[in-house]
Amino acid sequence: MVLTVLFAGLAAFCNALGSVLQRKGACSQPFDDAMSLRLLWRFVHQLPWLGGIAFMFGGFVLQVAALSTGPISLVQPVLVAEMGFTLVLSAMLLGSSMHTREWTAVIGMNSGIALLSLALRPTGGDTRQVSGPTWALGCAVTLVVITGLVLLAHRYHYAPRAACLGIAAGMFFGFIAVLVSGITGTFAGGPKAVMTAWQTYALLVAGPAGFFLLQVTLRVGSLVASQPGLTLANPLVGIGWGVAVFGEDVRGGGWVAVEIVGFALITACALLLARSPSLHGFAGAYEETEGSVEGEVEGEAESAEPPESTGLTGSTEDTAASEADESSDRNQENH
């Protein structure tokens, strides 16, 4: 169990560093450009973005190592530590600072992770014992929910869209962890068993799809909006699959209350961290600036409108009328 937690913790760190580096690279591109292959090609020429890809790949390898040594219900909750790492690394690489509130939230989140993991203490479970129809039903339900969130996200803009996409991306990466668990279950059969497992080829499709979804999520809004869902949805999918599908055993009875307290502490700290100025990316500033720019443009448009009558026009007309009357009187006198 110790080795599993170590691998998962290192994976969380690599994922956080990769996310921040990709965010830094993405901010160098204009925000009015839609996500496309051309934009991805421009990202490739950004050194921070490439570094982020490398660290995320390292995080994936470490996650595979963790899933091969322990149950998914243990691995995925530990990955929640990614958000605390993201805050610290954002402060270091994006030029922000951390205060007492942020440090308290990071410590509280890690405490919640430890409490939840100890309360769950998952054991058992075997992906090789899961039937084909059960795999199909679980995959269908998960993908339908993710698709619904993506479609819902396109009805909103900025922070709400980033929040929906963050949850969808978090669920998708949890689903990728499920596929990886299925693959690690075939390790005992050697390379042939790995190459003949359907999860291997599903991962080849799901991996790039999750990568693209993450890029879209990082693109549409700041980490403040997307990171909570991205972080919290992942372990929920893992625990759900581990218990309901893979048959992993977790502690019940009075431990359920402890598990609820642990997850509530994680959620509260995640929401607190989401309010941290250290996680405000360039996109968040862009969103706020755009509103102010629109206001300035409207103000300039209003100021360009013809001024209302100040009474000067009326005075000029009265004066002209008086002069005309005087001229008429003079003409009558001359006659």
Image (spheres, grey):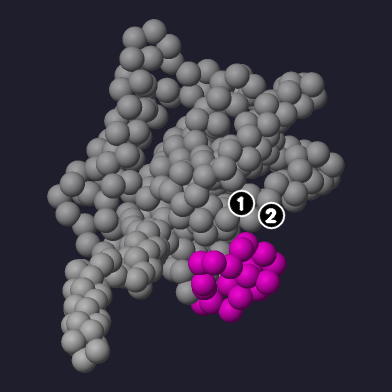
**Which residues fall within the magenta stretch?**
29-48
Quadrant holding the C terminus: bottom left
Note whether 314 is above or below 162 in the view shown.
below
Residue 46 shown in magenta: yes
The residue lying at 29 percent from left, 70 percent from top is 307
Q: In terms of secondary structure, where does tag 2 sit?
A: helix
Quadrant holding the N terminus: top left
Could you say where residue 182 lies in the image, as x and y percent from the top left? 69, 35
Q: Which of the two residues, 84 or 165, is positioned nearer the viewer here? A: 165
Residue 103, which numbered label?
none
**Crowdedness near tag 2: few (<14), some (14–19) or many (≥20) residues, C-alpha within 10 Å:** few
Q: Nearer the viewer, mark 2 or mark 1?
A: 1
**Crowdedness near tag 1: few (<14), some (14–19) or many (≥20) residues, C-alpha within 10 Å:** many
Q: Is residue 277 left or right of residue 131?
A: left
Q: Quadrant of residue 319?
A: bottom left
Q: In terms of secondary structure, where does tag 1 sit?
A: helix
The residue lying at 43 percent from left, 24 percent from top is 121
Could you say where residue 89 lies in the image, as x and y percent from the top left? 34, 61
Q: Amino acid at mark 2?
A: Pro
| Residue on which the image places disc 2 | 208
Q: Which of the two residues, 290 or 236, is positioned nearer the viewer here? A: 290
Q: Which of the two residues, 95 or 196, is positioned nearer the viewer here? A: 95
Q: Count how many numbered circles sit on residues in the image.
A: 2
Residue 213, which numbered label?
1
| Residue 124 seen anywhere in this rendered image of the structure | no
Could you say where residue 138 lies in the image, as x and y percent from the top left? 69, 26
Residue projecting furthest to the top = 253
N-term-proximal mark, 2 vs 1: 2
